[in-house]
Image: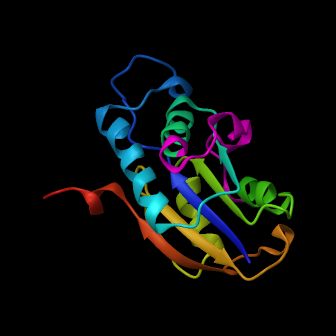
Amino acid sequence: MKTITFIRHAKSDRKQDVPDFERPLNDRGKNDAPLMGQVIKSDFILPDLIISSPANRAKTTARLIAAEIGYAEQEILYLENLYFADTETFLSIIRDMENNFESIYMISHNPGITYIVSRTSDTRLDHMPTCGVSQIKFDVSSWSDIEDKSGKLVRFDKPKNHKEK
């Protein structure tokens, strides 16, 4: 059994006059990422490996979540091709994973993160919200065996579900 948890980066600050790659999290994003880290720690399968886009907003999200779940920050793997990855790029990364990892987290950007959840799971996801988390289980022993619609979405959550109205 293999598990992938796809996480969209937390809310970024579009008001900053910096290149897209360097955009930081805004205040909401800085609060949502630790919040979702706490949710993940109590309700999700934890990762053997966290992989993230190296863009500032994804990297910061990865670090904040890692801190909450007790995952060593220096163990996060940053892959350039996760910056606005399409589904083929996600699948290539997934299928090349070493089989000693049973659970991986992938932190990236829309629209690719939404599309890969829909492509690999039994559920159609129309929009992955910022800091949204989708966990998919695959009844395979090798990452290379993951195919379209071969996974079961076992958990989906977002920051809005954990805030007072």
Which residue is at a point 68% across and 47% down the rendered structure image?
Answer: 51
Classify 160 as above or below 23. below
Which residue is at a point 55% across and 44% down the rendered structure image?
Answer: 66
Place of residue 158 in the rendered image (x, y in percent of width and height, measured from the top left): 37, 60
* Residue farthest toward the left in the current orientation of the protein: 165
Classify 49 as above or below 100. above
Position of 67 with respect to 88 (left or right) is: left
Q: Which residues are magenta?
A: 66-87
* Residue farthest toward the top in the current orientation of the protein: 17
* Residue farthest toward the front in the current orientation of the protein: 70
Residue 135, quarter of picture: bottom right
Residue 79 magenta-drawn?
yes
Place of residue 105 in the rendered image (x, y in percent of width and height, measured from the top left): 63, 55
3 and 92: which is toward the camera: 3
Q: How is the image coloured?
A: rainbow
67 and 11: which is toward the camera: 67
Place of residue 121 in the rendered image (x, y in percent of width and height, measured from the top left): 61, 76
Residue 13, quarter of picture: top left
Quadrant, the N terminus: bottom right
Place of residue 115 in the rendered image (x, y in percent of width and height, measured from the top left): 57, 63
Quadrant, the C terminus: bottom left
Q: How many marks?
A: 0
Position of 124 with respect to 72 (left or right) is: left
Which residue is at a point 74% across and 53% down the rendered structure image?
Answer: 89
Residue 74 magenta-drawn?
yes
Which residue is at a point 45% across and 69% down the rendered structure image?
Answer: 156
Classify 151 as above or below 42. below
30 and 72: which is toward the camera: 72
Classify 58 as above or below 112. above
